[in-house]
Image (spheres, helix red, strand yellow):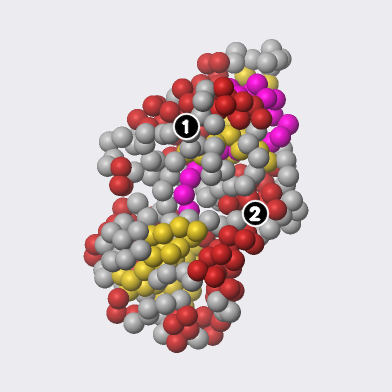
Amino acid sequence: MSSQEFELTLQADPVYAFGIILSIISDALHYELPSLRKTTINLIPGMFSPVSAVAEGEADMGLTTPPVCVTLAYRGLGPFKKKMKNLRAIGSFPHDDRLMWAVTEDSGINSIEEMKDKPGRLVLRSAEHPVRLVVEKILEAYGTSLNDLKRCGWQIIEESHTLKIPVFVTKGKADAVIDEARKTPPWIQLTESRSMKFLPVREDVLQKMEDQYGYRKAILSKGMLRGIEKDVPCIDFSEWLMFVRDDMPDDFAYLIARIFDERKGQFEAYFRNIPLERSDLVYPIDMKKVWRNVGDIPLHPGAERYYREHGYM
């Protein structure tokens, strides 16, 4: 690796876990590389923004969730107007999440199709978030849209912060909520204080989301939250993807993969005081799985070499 001095920029959404991860990686890189003069960590709201920043050379490494954010960029879909074929994966931190489409029990709604006939108040993400994009695409596959729901009498409430969204329903200010982050306290408090019904996404719609956009199918399993009384087909929102560009030197990507492996106990330490069923990070980290769900973009050759040399692939 070159001894010439250089700087790095890392970018992610200001989720607390992402700040922890990037700080640990930065510390390890400075320990390993005396020539690394400065690391800037940009925590900027948005899961799509680090993808664009890395692809366009404004950042050297990013974190995002779910990995489909890079799938969309790689294919030039959704908010990405051109194909960003220079994106490469390092690996994904294990994170077990789902997109949840929930309505209050007293709304009388039993399916997504029924929403147009039983208007209420829906809270969901603002337009720049991947949740909003997939909600719009799902509704489109059902032959409707948020604007159609508005015309049917629905009030659409937009909120950008994860922890504030379920609170609208908890406090009686909304009748339906669509979001991820199932393990966060606001979702737990919502389901323990209100009787909620979780709506399934039709199989043909799930298949279309996977085929056209790369959103993975998943199951909101019975008992994951109070009110989930049977398995509910849904969209997967698992994993925190760490990614770079294809022009990153192989030895450098290899080093990041090694840090991921050797510092995994340090990453886990921030979450081990939280019961596993409530922890955003799934621990222990299994290095034989971190390269699997990486958003359908190629692994960086340097990271792949590390995984193969250590028997993880």
Is residue 241 covered in magenta? yes
Inspect the image, locate mark 2, and give the three-letter code of the amino acid beneath it: Leu
Q: Relative to the observer, which residue lies in front, 198 or 181?
A: 198
| Residue with the most extreme left position | 193
x, y percentage for residue 125?
50, 62
According to the picture, the residue beneath numbered tag 2 turns out to be 72
Q: Is residue 23 visible?
A: no
- Residue at left offset 58%, top offset 60%: 210
Q: Is residue 291 above or below residue 257?
A: below
Secondary structure, mark 2, is helix
Q: Which region of the structure is painted magenta?
A: 237-256
x, y percentage for residue 7?
65, 24
x, y percentage for residue 26?
53, 26
Marked residue nearer the N-terminal end (1 or 2): 2
- Residue at left offset 28%, top offset 66%: 229
Mark 2 surroundings within 10 Å by alpha-carbon count, few (fewer than 14), some (14 through 19), many (20 or more)? many
Label ID, residue 162: none
Secondary structure, mark 1, is loop
Q: Look at the image and tell me in which quarter the C terminus lies.
A: top right
x, y percentage for residue 36?
62, 19
According to the picture, the residue beneath numbered tag 1 turns out to be 287
Residue 243, quarter of the rendered image: top right
